[in-house]
Amino acid sequence: MGLRETKKQQTRTAIADAALPLFLEHGFDQVTVAEVARHAGVSTNTVFNYFPTKEDLFFDRHAEVEGHLATLVRDRAPSACPVVTIRDDLLTALRHEDPALGLHADTPRFWQVIHDSAALRAREREISERAEAALATALAEHPPNISTGWNQNNHSMFRLLAGAIAGTHRAALRELQQCILSGEQPTNARDSVATAAVQALNLLCSGLHPDADQASQELRLPQ
């Protein structure tokens, strides 16, 4: 990355870093872009150059989130099941208490801000829809290895499969969120959601590979 791009990335990060504490303290709808610009030490136009909408300021990593599942599918080994790949990535994130999963103390406030804003809830749905569409494309380009009953030219099937996988993944994260917001200890929430997520994703995997060795689907919970 050249100097110009490095400076642009630094500016973008500085703006996002200035915005989030304001949103967490006051709520998304109560904070203006002008206030974010003032705290970041830039002009309002500069903010909009990097973030076309205020929602983009809050979900500043949306591109990464939208492409995550698709990237996992594209980068997996040719013989690997896409469901197992996504399942294992989720378990790894849970084991390592990835901050994006909400296992840190300040994350419930982030979720609450989303819950309190119709605009953010709508943008969250859009991000989920784009992630699912990207996953469908990745599955069509890198389909699972299935011996019978699979028509690789049936793009509707890829979209339906992506909906099942992405929906299960999304539901697992939502369940983790709800458990923690209800006051459950994060480690207990993590372990219970990990168990449920593996069971659900294994069912999807079994549907794709009914003769697969179940030993490969053993659950290893975080310690």
Image (cartoon, helix red, strand yellow):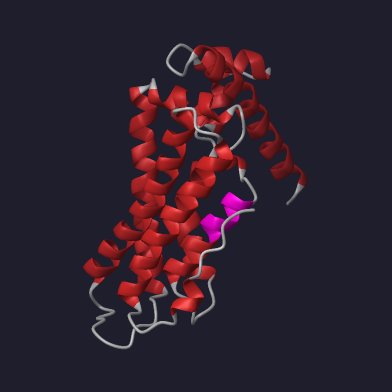
* Residue farthest right in this picture: 3
In depth, the one of 155 and 105 nearer the eye is: 105
Left of 167 or right of it: where is 113? right
> Horizontal and vertical percent for residue 144?
39, 77
Left of 195 or right of it: where is 223? right
Q: Is residue 30 above or below residue 93?
A: above
Left of 10 or right of it: where is 188? left
Q: Is residue 36 above or below residue 75?
A: above
Q: Can residue 81 be seen in this view?
A: yes
* Residue farthest bottom in this picture: 147
Residue name at image x 53 percent, y 49 percent: 191
Q: Is residue 21 above or below residue 137?
A: above
Q: In this view, does 168 lie above or below 50?
A: below
Residue name at image x 37 percent, y 64 percent: 137
In depth, the one of 59 and 188 nearer the eye is: 188
Residue name at image x 46 percent, y 22 percent: 113
The prevailing secondary structure element of the residues shown in magenta is helix
Residue 32 magenta-highlighted: no
> Horizontal and vertical percent for residue 194?
49, 53
> Horizontal and vertical percent for residue 80?
49, 77
Q: In which quarter of the image is residue 186?
A: top right
Per the rendered image, the range of residues in magenta is 89-95
Residue name at image x 75 percent, y 49 percent: 2
In depth, the one of 153 and 73 nearer the eye is: 73
Left of 106 or right of it: where is 87? left
